Every structure is written in C-alpha cells, then in structure tokens.
Amino acid sequence: MSDAQEDSLLTKAVNILKKNGVISYPTEGVWGLGCDPLSRHAVNRILSLKNRAEAKGLILIGSRHDQFANLIEKLSDEHRVRFMQNLSRPTTWILPTNKEIPCWISGSHESVAVRVTDHPIAQKLCSHFGRPIVSTSCNPQGVQPAINQQQVIDYFGDKLDFIVPGDVGNPGSVSDIIELTSNKVIRLG
C-alpha cells in the first residue's frame, strides 16, 4: 500500500471516529476495536458488541507519551520517568485517573489503563486523531481475539463502521499490564 493510500484510509478512519463511529485496526498482537473515548454512544456500541460490562473499564492507546499529559502531570517524577521508559515489550500502564477520564472508560476503577502503541498503523491512527483512542481486543466475550482481518469480519462484519487494513505485529501476543504507582505486574504478555 502506498503512503497516499494509507493516509487516505487513516483520514477516513479518523473522520468516522469523530462521528461517534466504531472501527477495527491492527495492533501489536491482536486486532483492536476502537472509538473516541469521549463518545459514550460509541463506547456503548463497543461494550455491546463484546458483551462486556462497563464496570471493567477500557484501555486507551496513544501515539506518544504526551497524549496522556493530563494523566501524567500529577505523577511523581519517579513514576513519570517509569511511564516514559521505552520498554522492550508492549506495556499497558494502570495510572490513577482524574476527572477528565469519563466513568465509561475507567469503569468501576479509580485508575485507567493506557498504552503508547508501537504498532505503526495504530500509532498513525492516534496521531491523526490527535489524542488517545479506545483500544480493546476485537472479539466477543469468551472468544479468542482476532489476529487477522478475516476474523474481524467473521466476528463483527457490518456492525463496524470501518476496518483499517493491515497486519498485527506479533500475532496472538498481548501486552504486559503494570500498575504504575505500585509497580505490581497484573499480566505478563
């Protein structure tokens, strides 16, 4: 795919996000479902597709650490440095939430899960959007996440507004999840 074609597809995806749409796109290990985290309507569509409870909360991905400035500004210097590290594996950090994070993102938690994505398509998507997007695995509850575009279509077909073409980075792998302030490992990918 040429750069111009990719840019056109990303522009289309961003326009759909801005109109409360739900998209799917490749990430580091599995396909993701995404939307504008400020759109309760779009988030509810994702939760309905996945049959997922709002109380569980959702992950946000961004293209750069500074896309999470509102969350990291109140962290201690030590925690901010840890969050800004470039780790060798995709890492989702659990950060303390604040009033800017909607309850439909944090769920029943006083924290929010965030990841600076290394996947080139997901990274460009967040960059074009200008801020983080929701990123949850593309699968109905109880089913393995999609690792290719055909599985995305099989799972959700025309229930999605757009599918950004591409390939996952390392099919089937998942990110590490670490609680930043306690350094507690929730999951090793």
Image (cartoon, rainbow, N blue to C red):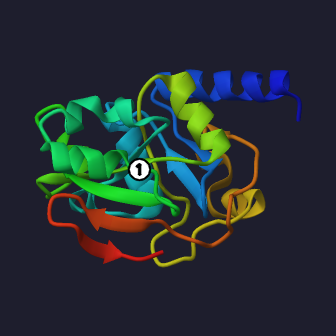
| Residue 17 relative to residue 93: left or right | right
| Residue 56 relative to residue 21: left or right | left
The image shows residue 127 at horizontal and vertical percentages of: 53, 27
Picture quadrant of residue 170: bottom right
Residue at position x 66%, y 42% in the image: 120
Q: Which of 75 and 61 is in front in this view?
A: 75
Label tally: 1
- Quadrant showing the N terminus: top right
Q: Is mark 1 on a helix, strand or loop?
A: strand
Q: Can residue 93 be seen in this view?
A: yes
Picture quadrant of residue 30: bottom right
Residue named by callout 1: 115
- Vertical comparison of 54 with 16: above or below: below
The image shows residue 85 at horizontal and vertical percentages of: 39, 50
The image shows residue 25 at horizontal and vertical percentages of: 63, 47
Local crowd size for mark 1, using a 10 Å CA cut-off: few (<14), some (14–19), many (≥20): many
Q: What residue type is labelled 1?
A: Arg
Residue at position x 52%, y 40% in the image: 22
- Vertical comparison of 184 with 22: above or below: below
| Residue 34 relative to residue 95: left or right | right
Residue at position x 38%, y 58% in the image: 92
Q: Nearer the viewer, residue 144 or 160?
A: 144
Residue at position x 51%, y 63% in the image: 89
